[in-house]
Image (cartoon, grey):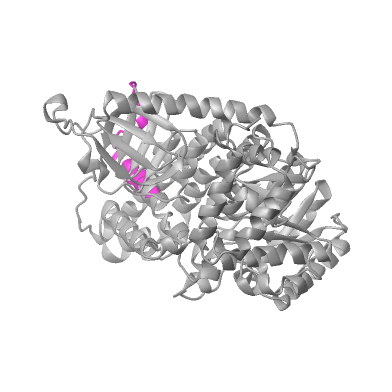
Amino acid sequence: MPPPTDRAAKSSTTRSDVRTYKGIGVSPGIAIGRALIIETRVASIYRVPIREEDVQSEVTRFLEALDKTREELLELKQKVSRSMGEEYASIFEAHAMIVTDASFADKVAQKIEFEQVNAEWALSEVEEELQARFQSFDDEYLRDRVADIKDVSERVLVNLQGIAHHDLSEIKHDVIIIADDLTPSDTVHFNRRPIVGLVTEGGGRTSHTSIIAKSLFMPAVIGVPRVTKVVDNDETIIVDGYEGIIIVNPTPALIEEYLSRTTRHAEAEKKLLENRDVPAVTRDSIRISLQANIELPEELDDAVKFGAEGIGLYRSEFLYISKSPLLPTEEEHFNTYRMLAEAVAPNWCVIRTFDLGGKKLAREVMGSKEDNPVLGLRALRLCMKHRDMFKTQLRALLRASAFGKIKIMFPLVSGVQELRQVKTLIREIRNELDIEGIAYNKELQIGIMIEVPSAAIIADVLATESDFFAIGTNDLIQYCLAIDRSNENVSYLYEPLHPALLRLIKGVIDAGKRAGIQVSMCGEMAADPIYATVLIGLGLEIFSMNPSSIPIVKNVVRAVRYRDCKRIADTALLKKTAQEIEEYVIESVAMRFPEGLVNKPE
């Protein structure tokens, strides 16, 4: 990417007022440093007509730039593989595939031939078309792929024009990067120091840039409107990746406060990790299992670090995202699942099948436009429509089950018929594997996510045909309360302690117990220590969450009695509003933990 811009004379124009800006915290932590503004400077590209006899040589020039770009990306993949692991390296393997994908490479070549224009212009036109198409989608995952297209296109353009390519690793002093947006290629070059934090205007939680920043343990806040315009070079910045805010020109007192917070976070984590190897057992001997939600195999290290008892949810979507616009092969699925199974042994690993909306697949797979993807063709519904794609994943899952304790979990099941259909498909695959002489676990457990109100209401019926349940509160709240949690106009109605939701959760847990099957919770609600007492009181015995949340939830579990939690839950169920329940629960937790949730009272 271009070198940092030299905009604004440093101290003479730097403002002295304290200013706070809100974004999205995608990588936790606190960083304090000087702002370095990175602005993308788009090279001037002109439309140059070429003679018919020169068309082929222009196409050849473009293809040579493609080949060079692909070689660079594969070299970068090897570098990332050594330093960060295969899952992150696959991002750049996918970029290398985009270079030769028909929707990209062939379109540029065709534009050169049909319009008789220079390669730079044809490339920029195709890039704009693809970006506009991706940005028009409602779906966050697909919109976040715009950065990948931009990254690849810029690399090809650099090779076409013979421009020296600068990257952020050239910076040698402590800084916080302030940028309009950053490509994965930029981000992966970050050293742990001198770059100590990251703030961008663009990006999403699921963008490759955000994922890489989190893997580097670099505090990062994205989605800060106009941040490159409201911050000047060399202004002191505090990046709070926990709260998703940045503070510009903090006072000495604020800096001291955040330095103290950093120390307190480190001390709190150290204190909480003292209980890493002890079981999560209430004071009256009720055993609670705390498991981890992960989407990258590399996160297994965090799961071990924070004391997870297995993987309660492996989101297999990232395997698809990292290979987009292509689909992962059966062997790529199998190798990932086998590695997970062997790594978590002797604990269980619950793998959720593909759970993205219709627009999150490569367009070659999808055949229709989704006007309302939240209520449309997504998750299990989509998979059952595209059975060849689904069978690839299911075959790999069954094969991997021979190498460890794997469970398969299906998302967005709304009724018994859907479950029976997918179980029939699994029986067909088992017959195929038997004929081929391929081993798999004959006792493989098959469970479902309870995240649709209809499934929660008939949980007693579904329990007779499922081996386990996992309550997915993120979608269950959304569907139960009829709100779009990404819509800022109604987000205030997203209430985990709504009486209707608590009644649904209790009904699911009770149905599971009556049927003798395990019930877990893997939504964000399970990671909140404030809600832990209520959930334990409702009878929940398996919590699955982000690994870093496990120690504090364990601290709560080990400090309470089940009978007290049940009393809290029973009282909460009698109250009429989410606000009444929340006030009551917070008051009850405050009485039990007067010194805060980190410090267990004597």
Looking at the figure, which quarter contains the C terminus?
top right
Please say if 350 is above or below 339: below
- Count the labels in the image: 0
Taking the spot 40% from the left edge, 63% from the top edge, the residue there is: 487
Please identify the quarter of the rendering in which residue 140 is found. Answer: bottom left
| Location of residue 165 in the rendering, given as x and y in whole percent from the top left corner | 33, 34
Seen from this angle, which residue lies furthest left? 12
In the rendered view, tell whether residue 41 sits above or below residue 331: above
Task: Specify whether residue 421 is painted magenta.
Answer: no
Q: Considering the image in quadrants, where does the N terminus appear? A: top left
Residue 158 counted in the magenta span:
yes
Q: Position of residue 104 (x, y in %)?
A: 41, 58
Residue 375 in picture, x, y percent from top left: 52, 73
In this view, the residue in front, 276 or 397, is: 276
Residue drawn at (35%, 27%) of the image: 32
Drawn side of residue 473 relative to residue 445, left or right: left
Q: Which residue is farthest top?
A: 173
Q: Is there any visible trace of residue 130 in the rendered image?
A: yes
Residue 431 appears left or right of 316: right
In the image, residue 449 sits, relative to residue 22, either above or below, namely below
Q: What stretch is highlighted in magenta?
A: 152-173
